[in-house]
Amino acid sequence: MATCEIHLQLLLGKRVLDSTGKPIGHIEEVRAHKVKNGLFKNI
């Protein structure tokens, strides 16, 4: 699996769309847990 870097704080406030492209809200909170290899997983 390829890896990439994501700055989670940049997702805050971003608009969320449904499968038809209609806006349904925005991201208010991001939660992640750091694992020993330096990657994050959602909790």
Image (cartoon, rainbow, N blue to C red):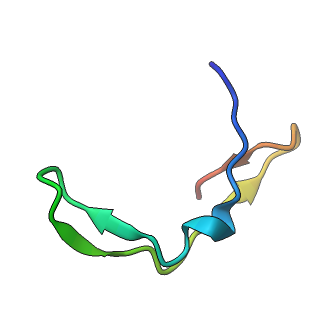
Residue plotted at (65% across, 21% down): 2
Quadrant in the picture for the N terminus = top right
Please state which of residues 1 and 5 is positioned toward the viewer in this rendering: 5
The image quarter in which residue 23 lies: bottom left
Please state which of residues 20 and 41 is positioned toward the viewer in this rendering: 20
Residue 31 in view of the camera: no
Is residue 2 shown above or below 29? Answer: above
Residue plotted at (68% across, 50% down): 6
Quadrant in the picture for the C terminus = bottom right
Residue plotted at (45% across, 71% down): 14
Is residue 17 shown above or below 40? Answer: below
Please state which of residues 42 and 25 is positioned toward the viewer in this rendering: 25
Query: How many numbered discs sit on the rendered protein?
Result: 0
Q: Residue furthest top?
A: 1
Is residue 1 shown above or below 43? Answer: above
Residue 8 percent across, percent down from the top left: 65, 62
Q: Residue furthest left?
A: 20
Residue 38 percent across, percent down from the top left: 86, 43
Residue 36 in view of the camera: yes
Residue 26 percent across, percent down from the top left: 37, 76
Please state which of residues 26 and 32 is positioned toward the viewer in this rendering: 26
